[in-house]
Amino acid sequence: MDMNGKTALVTGASRGIGRAIAIELAKQGARYILLIARNLDKLREVATEIRKYGAQAIPLSVDLTESKAVNIVVAQAWKDYGPFDLLVNCAGVAYQSNFLKTPLGQAHTELSTNLMGLYTVTWLVGRRMASRRQGTIVNVSSLMGKVAAPTMATYSATKFAIVGFTQALRHELAPHQVRVVTLLPSLTNTDMVEEFDLFRWVLPLSTEQVAQGLMSGLKSRTSEITIGWQSHLALWCQRFLPQAMDSIIGWSNPDRLRPSAKLGVRPN
Protein backbone atom coordinates (compact mmCIF):
# COMPACT_ATOMS: atom_id res chain seq x y z
CA MET A 1 0.00 0.00 0.00
CA ASP A 2 1.42 3.34 -1.08
CA MET A 3 0.65 5.98 1.56
CA ASN A 4 1.94 8.92 -0.45
CA GLY A 5 -0.70 11.67 -0.34
CA LYS A 6 -3.17 9.45 1.55
CA THR A 7 -5.30 10.07 4.64
CA ALA A 8 -5.10 7.83 7.71
CA LEU A 9 -6.96 7.63 11.01
CA VAL A 10 -5.03 6.07 13.91
CA THR A 11 -6.64 5.33 17.27
CA GLY A 12 -4.51 5.00 20.39
CA ALA A 13 -2.10 7.43 18.74
CA SER A 14 -0.93 9.22 21.88
CA ARG A 15 1.61 6.55 22.86
CA GLY A 16 3.14 3.17 22.17
CA ILE A 17 2.45 1.32 18.96
CA GLY A 18 -0.21 3.79 17.80
CA ARG A 19 2.20 6.70 18.13
CA ALA A 20 4.94 4.82 16.26
CA ILE A 21 2.55 3.86 13.45
CA ALA A 22 1.35 7.45 13.07
CA ILE A 23 4.93 8.71 12.79
CA GLU A 24 5.85 5.96 10.34
CA LEU A 25 2.85 6.90 8.17
CA ALA A 26 4.20 10.45 8.03
CA LYS A 27 7.59 9.12 6.95
CA GLN A 28 5.82 7.12 4.25
CA GLY A 29 4.34 10.30 2.78
CA ALA A 30 0.80 10.38 4.17
CA ARG A 31 -0.88 13.76 3.70
CA TYR A 32 -3.33 13.80 6.61
CA ILE A 33 -2.97 11.75 9.78
CA LEU A 34 -5.86 11.96 12.21
CA LEU A 35 -4.85 11.05 15.74
CA ILE A 36 -7.40 9.71 18.22
CA ALA A 37 -6.89 9.17 21.94
CA ARG A 38 -8.16 10.59 25.22
CA ASN A 39 -5.11 12.65 26.19
CA LEU A 40 -5.11 15.80 24.04
CA ASP A 41 -1.76 17.07 25.32
CA LYS A 42 0.01 13.86 24.32
CA LEU A 43 -1.73 13.90 20.94
CA ARG A 44 -0.43 17.40 20.33
CA GLU A 45 3.09 16.21 21.09
CA VAL A 46 2.72 13.43 18.52
CA ALA A 47 1.27 15.89 16.01
CA THR A 48 4.31 18.15 16.43
CA GLU A 49 6.60 15.19 15.71
CA ILE A 50 4.59 14.18 12.65
CA ARG A 51 4.70 17.65 11.13
CA LYS A 52 8.48 17.43 10.95
CA TYR A 53 7.96 14.95 8.11
CA GLY A 54 5.67 17.23 6.13
CA ALA A 55 2.37 15.56 6.99
CA GLN A 56 -0.61 17.36 8.45
CA ALA A 57 -1.54 15.93 11.84
CA ILE A 58 -4.95 16.47 13.42
CA PRO A 59 -5.30 15.55 17.12
CA LEU A 60 -8.82 14.45 18.10
CA SER A 61 -9.50 13.82 21.78
CA VAL A 62 -12.30 11.34 22.43
CA ASP A 63 -13.04 8.35 24.66
CA LEU A 64 -13.76 5.38 22.40
CA THR A 65 -16.14 3.90 24.96
CA GLU A 66 -18.47 6.90 24.39
CA SER A 67 -20.12 5.85 21.13
CA LYS A 68 -22.09 9.05 20.54
CA ALA A 69 -18.99 11.20 20.94
CA VAL A 70 -17.02 8.90 18.63
CA ASN A 71 -19.79 9.14 16.03
CA ILE A 72 -19.62 12.94 16.07
CA VAL A 73 -15.80 13.03 15.86
CA VAL A 74 -15.55 10.50 13.03
CA ALA A 75 -18.34 12.11 11.00
CA GLN A 76 -16.78 15.56 11.30
CA ALA A 77 -13.29 14.26 10.53
CA TRP A 78 -14.53 12.45 7.42
CA LYS A 79 -16.26 15.65 6.29
CA ASP A 80 -13.21 17.86 6.92
CA TYR A 81 -10.33 15.57 5.95
CA GLY A 82 -11.82 12.47 4.38
CA PRO A 83 -12.28 10.16 2.79
CA PHE A 84 -9.95 7.97 4.83
CA ASP A 85 -7.71 5.59 2.94
CA LEU A 86 -6.49 3.77 6.04
CA LEU A 87 -7.91 3.07 9.49
CA VAL A 88 -5.57 1.67 12.15
CA ASN A 89 -7.38 0.51 15.29
CA CYS A 90 -4.65 0.53 17.90
CA ALA A 91 -6.35 1.88 21.03
CA GLY A 92 -6.30 -0.50 23.96
CA VAL A 93 -5.52 -1.04 27.61
CA ALA A 94 -3.91 -3.97 29.37
CA TYR A 95 -3.86 -5.07 33.00
CA GLN A 96 -1.79 -7.87 34.39
CA SER A 97 -3.35 -9.73 37.28
CA ASN A 98 -4.25 -13.19 38.42
CA PHE A 99 -7.78 -14.00 37.22
CA LEU A 100 -9.02 -14.90 40.70
CA LYS A 101 -7.94 -11.48 41.96
CA THR A 102 -9.18 -9.45 39.00
CA PRO A 103 -11.85 -6.83 39.83
CA LEU A 104 -14.83 -6.95 37.47
CA GLY A 105 -14.52 -3.23 36.84
CA GLN A 106 -11.05 -3.75 35.46
CA ALA A 107 -12.30 -6.47 33.12
CA HIS A 108 -15.11 -4.23 31.91
CA THR A 109 -12.60 -1.49 31.09
CA GLU A 110 -10.52 -3.82 28.96
CA LEU A 111 -13.53 -5.28 27.18
CA SER A 112 -15.16 -1.92 26.45
CA THR A 113 -11.98 -0.21 25.23
CA ASN A 114 -10.19 -3.01 23.42
CA LEU A 115 -13.23 -4.58 21.81
CA MET A 116 -16.26 -2.28 21.73
CA GLY A 117 -14.15 0.83 21.10
CA LEU A 118 -12.57 -0.87 18.10
CA TYR A 119 -15.96 -2.17 16.94
CA THR A 120 -17.52 1.30 17.08
CA VAL A 121 -14.80 3.02 15.05
CA THR A 122 -14.71 0.20 12.51
CA TRP A 123 -18.49 0.33 12.09
CA LEU A 124 -18.43 4.08 11.49
CA VAL A 125 -15.47 4.13 9.12
CA GLY A 126 -16.07 0.75 7.45
CA ARG A 127 -19.53 1.73 6.22
CA ARG A 128 -18.11 4.88 4.65
CA MET A 129 -15.26 2.98 3.02
CA ALA A 130 -17.69 0.37 1.69
CA SER A 131 -19.88 3.06 0.13
CA ARG A 132 -16.82 4.50 -1.54
CA ARG A 133 -15.58 1.00 -2.46
CA GLN A 134 -12.07 1.74 -1.32
CA GLY A 135 -10.03 1.61 1.88
CA THR A 136 -7.93 -0.49 4.25
CA ILE A 137 -8.68 -1.34 7.88
CA VAL A 138 -5.95 -2.62 10.23
CA ASN A 139 -7.05 -4.08 13.55
CA VAL A 140 -4.18 -4.38 16.00
CA SER A 141 -4.49 -7.63 17.90
CA SER A 142 -1.49 -9.34 19.48
CA LEU A 143 0.34 -12.62 19.66
CA MET A 144 -1.91 -13.02 22.74
CA GLY A 145 -4.79 -13.13 20.27
CA LYS A 146 -3.42 -16.47 19.08
CA VAL A 147 -1.56 -17.79 22.12
CA ALA A 148 -3.26 -16.91 25.41
CA ALA A 149 -1.09 -15.73 28.27
CA PRO A 150 -1.59 -16.43 31.98
CA THR A 151 -2.10 -13.29 34.11
CA MET A 152 -3.50 -11.64 30.97
CA ALA A 153 -6.78 -13.54 30.65
CA THR A 154 -9.09 -10.61 29.87
CA TYR A 155 -6.59 -8.97 27.54
CA SER A 156 -6.09 -12.26 25.71
CA ALA A 157 -9.86 -12.64 25.41
CA THR A 158 -10.18 -9.24 23.75
CA LYS A 159 -7.32 -9.94 21.36
CA PHE A 160 -8.74 -13.36 20.39
CA ALA A 161 -12.06 -11.61 19.73
CA ILE A 162 -10.34 -9.05 17.50
CA VAL A 163 -8.79 -11.85 15.42
CA GLY A 164 -12.19 -13.47 14.89
CA PHE A 165 -13.95 -10.17 14.23
CA THR A 166 -11.32 -9.18 11.67
CA GLN A 167 -11.50 -12.53 9.89
CA ALA A 168 -15.27 -12.26 9.52
CA LEU A 169 -15.09 -8.62 8.46
CA ARG A 170 -12.43 -9.43 5.87
CA HIS A 171 -14.89 -11.62 3.98
CA GLU A 172 -17.86 -9.29 4.45
CA LEU A 173 -16.06 -6.21 3.15
CA ALA A 174 -14.13 -7.89 0.33
CA PRO A 175 -17.03 -7.46 -2.15
CA HIS A 176 -16.92 -3.74 -1.33
CA GLN A 177 -13.19 -3.54 -2.19
CA VAL A 178 -12.22 -2.81 1.42
CA ARG A 179 -9.19 -4.67 2.69
CA VAL A 180 -9.17 -5.79 6.34
CA VAL A 181 -5.94 -6.86 8.02
CA THR A 182 -4.92 -8.17 11.45
CA LEU A 183 -1.65 -7.00 13.00
CA LEU A 184 -0.09 -9.51 15.42
CA PRO A 185 2.93 -8.12 17.28
CA SER A 186 4.49 -9.98 20.17
CA LEU A 187 5.10 -8.22 23.49
CA THR A 188 6.20 -4.66 22.70
CA ASN A 189 8.23 -2.28 24.84
CA THR A 190 5.69 0.44 25.67
CA ASP A 191 4.87 2.41 28.79
CA MET A 192 1.73 0.30 29.11
CA VAL A 193 3.74 -2.82 29.97
CA GLU A 194 6.88 -1.37 31.53
CA GLU A 195 5.75 -2.33 35.04
CA PHE A 196 4.54 -5.81 34.10
CA ASP A 197 6.17 -8.95 35.42
CA LEU A 198 7.58 -10.08 32.10
CA PHE A 199 7.23 -13.60 30.81
CA ARG A 200 10.29 -15.82 30.87
CA TRP A 201 12.22 -15.93 27.57
CA VAL A 202 10.18 -13.14 25.95
CA LEU A 203 12.21 -10.32 24.36
CA PRO A 204 10.02 -7.24 23.79
CA LEU A 205 9.91 -5.61 20.36
CA SER A 206 10.35 -1.88 19.89
CA THR A 207 7.37 0.15 18.73
CA GLU A 208 9.38 1.18 15.66
CA GLN A 209 9.82 -2.48 14.69
CA VAL A 210 6.06 -2.98 14.85
CA ALA A 211 5.32 0.14 12.81
CA GLN A 212 7.85 -0.76 10.13
CA GLY A 213 6.57 -4.33 10.06
CA LEU A 214 3.06 -3.06 9.46
CA MET A 215 4.19 -0.94 6.52
CA SER A 216 6.02 -3.89 4.98
CA GLY A 217 3.01 -6.14 5.50
CA LEU A 218 0.63 -3.67 3.87
CA LYS A 219 2.73 -3.80 0.72
CA SER A 220 1.99 -7.52 0.46
CA ARG A 221 -1.43 -9.16 0.17
CA THR A 222 -1.27 -11.01 3.46
CA SER A 223 -4.35 -10.89 5.68
CA GLU A 224 -2.44 -11.32 8.95
CA ILE A 225 0.79 -9.46 9.61
CA THR A 226 2.89 -11.22 12.23
CA ILE A 227 5.70 -9.17 13.75
CA GLY A 228 8.82 -10.64 15.34
CA TRP A 229 10.55 -14.00 15.10
CA GLN A 230 9.18 -14.97 18.51
CA SER A 231 5.65 -14.58 17.18
CA HIS A 232 6.38 -16.75 14.16
CA LEU A 233 8.01 -19.40 16.35
CA ALA A 234 5.18 -19.37 18.88
CA LEU A 235 2.53 -19.74 16.17
CA TRP A 236 4.46 -22.59 14.56
CA CYS A 237 4.72 -24.38 17.89
CA GLN A 238 1.05 -23.73 18.64
CA ARG A 239 0.11 -25.39 15.36
CA PHE A 240 2.51 -28.30 15.19
CA LEU A 241 3.59 -28.87 18.82
CA PRO A 242 0.59 -27.79 20.91
CA GLN A 243 1.48 -29.83 24.00
CA ALA A 244 5.03 -28.51 24.03
CA MET A 245 3.72 -24.99 23.56
CA ASP A 246 1.34 -25.46 26.47
CA SER A 247 4.26 -26.47 28.69
CA ILE A 248 6.30 -23.45 27.57
CA ILE A 249 3.42 -21.12 28.41
CA GLY A 250 3.13 -22.70 31.84
CA TRP A 251 6.84 -22.27 32.56
CA SER A 252 6.81 -18.65 31.38
CA ASN A 253 3.92 -17.73 33.70
CA PRO A 254 4.91 -14.81 36.00
CA ASP A 255 2.83 -16.42 38.77
CA ARG A 256 5.06 -19.47 38.59
CA LEU A 257 8.19 -17.35 38.76
CA ARG A 258 6.91 -15.51 41.84
CA PRO A 259 4.71 -18.04 43.63
CA SER A 260 4.61 -16.16 46.92
CA ALA A 261 4.04 -12.71 45.45
CA LYS A 262 0.74 -10.97 45.81
CA LEU A 263 -0.29 -9.84 42.36
CA GLY A 264 -1.78 -6.38 42.19
CA VAL A 265 -3.64 -4.57 39.45
CA ARG A 266 -1.43 -2.44 37.28
CA PRO A 267 -3.27 0.28 35.40
CA ASN A 268 -2.03 1.64 32.08
Image (tube, rainbow, N blue to C red):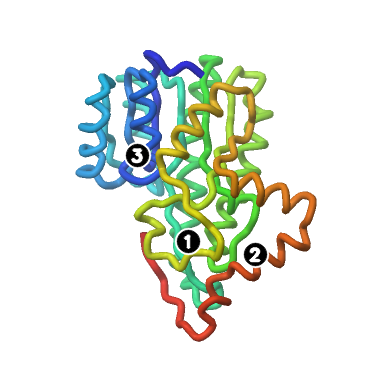
Q: Which residue is mark 3?
A: 19
Mark 2 near mark 1, Cβ–Cβ under 8 Å? no
Type of the residue with mark 2: Ile
Element assignment for label 3: helix
Q: Residues within 10 Å of mark 3 (few under 14, many from 20)?
A: many
Q: Position of residue 175 (x, y in %)?
A: 66, 19
| Residue 106, quarter of picture | bottom left
Seen at 46% across and 29% down, the residue is 87
**How far is disc 2 from disc 1 in space, using C-alphas?**
25 Å
Type of the residue with mark 1: His
Res. 249 mark: 2
User: Mark 1 or mark 3, which is nearer the start of the sequence?
Assistant: 3
User: Mark 3 or mark 2, which is nearer the start of the sequence?
Assistant: 3
Seen at 52% across and 27% down, the residue is 216
Q: Nearer the viewer, mark 2 or mark 3?
A: 2
Seen at 30% across and 20% down, the residue is 80
